[in-house]
C-alpha cells in the first residue's frame, strides 16, 4: 500500500456538521415518537379505564347473579313439596281416602269445567261431607298443605248442624302442571 492510498476522510470531518446532523436525527426521532407513540399511549390508557369500568360492572353483576341464585335455591328448597306437587296427577280415590280421615262421610263431584291458566290446569270440585266438629274441618284444611297435590279449599263453605253431626259443602281447586 502506498501512503497516498490511505483513507483521509476522517481528517476532513467537520464537527459542526456532525452536530447538526445528530440534532436533526434526534429532532426527527422525537417528532416520530410524539406523532405515533404518544397517541397510542393515551388510547391505551383510555381503553384500560374502559376495561376496568367494565370489569367492575361485570363483578357487580356477577355478585347480583350469585345472590339471586342463592335465593332461588333457597326458595326451591323451601317450596320443593309444592313444586313437586304440581306435576302429580290428581287421583280422586286417594283424595277421598284422605278426606275420610277427617270426615265421617264424604263425596266428590265435579263442580265446573276445567279452568285454564297459561301455566297450569285448574280443576274445580265440590266436596260434600259429614263431620263431628268444626275442628276436624280445620285439621283437614291444615292437611291440604302436605297433600301430594296442590289443593285449595274455596268459598263458599257451608256448614249446617244436623243432630250430632255437621253437614258441610265446599269447593276445592286442584292445580296441575300443563
Image: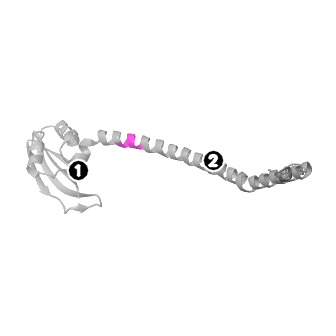
**What segment carries the magenta color?**
67-72
Which residue occupies the foreground of this view, 81 or 26? 26
* Residue at screen point 92% across, 50% down: 16
Q: Quadrant of the C terminus?
A: bottom left
Q: Main secondary structure of the magenta part?
A: helix
Q: Position of residue 2 (x, y in %)?
A: 83, 51
Rendered position, 135 above or below 116: above
Residue 174 in view in this figure = yes
Which residue occupies the foreground of this view, 40 or 10? 10
Residue 71 shown in magenta: yes
* Residue at screen point 8% across, 49% down: 93
Q: Position of residue 75 (x, y in %)?
A: 34, 41
- Asked which quadrant contains residue 163, the reply is top left
Label at residue 111? none
Q: Which residue is mark 1?
A: 86
Secondary-structure class at tag 2: helix
> Tag 1 or tag 2, which sits nearer the N-term?
2
Q: Position of residue 104 (x, y in %)?
A: 8, 41
* Residue at screen point 34% across, 41% down: 73
- Front label number (2 vs 1): 2
Q: Position of residue 45 (x, y in %)?
A: 66, 48
- Asked which quadrant contains residue 119, the reply is bottom left
Q: Which residue is mark 2?
A: 49
Rendered position, 53 above or below 121: above
Amino acid at each position: 500500500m502506498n501512503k497516498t492510498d490511505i483513507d483521509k476522510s476522517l481528517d476532513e470531518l467537520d464537527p459542526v456538521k456532525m452536530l447538526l446532523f445528530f440534532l436533526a436525527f434526534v429532532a426527527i426521532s422525537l417528532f416520530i415518537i410524539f406523532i405515533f407513540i404518544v397517541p397510542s399511549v393515551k388510547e391505551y390508557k383510555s381503553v384500560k379505564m374502559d376495561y376496568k369500568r367494565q370489569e367492575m360492572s361485570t363483578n357487580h353483576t356477577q355478585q347480583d347473579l350469585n345472590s339471586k341464585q342463592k335465593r332461588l335455591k333457597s326458595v326451591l328448597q323451601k317450596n320443593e313439596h309444592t313444586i313437586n306437587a304440581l306435576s302429580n296427577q290428581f287421583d280422586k280415590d286417594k283424595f277421598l281416602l284422605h278426606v275420610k280421615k277427617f270426615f265421617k262421610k264424604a263425596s266428590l263431584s265435579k263442580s265446573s269445567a276445567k279452568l285454564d291458566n297459561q301455566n297450569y290446569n285448574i280443576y274445580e270440585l265440590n266436596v260434600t261431607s259429614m263431620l263431628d266438629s268444626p275442628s276436624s274441618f280445620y285439621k283437614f284444611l291444615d292437611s291440604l298443605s302436605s297433600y301430594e297435590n296442590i289443593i285449595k279449599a274455596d268459598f263458599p263453605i257451608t256448614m249446617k248442624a244436623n243432630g250430632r253431626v255437621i253437614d258441610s259443602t265446599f269447593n276445592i281447586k286442584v292445580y296441575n302442571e300443563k
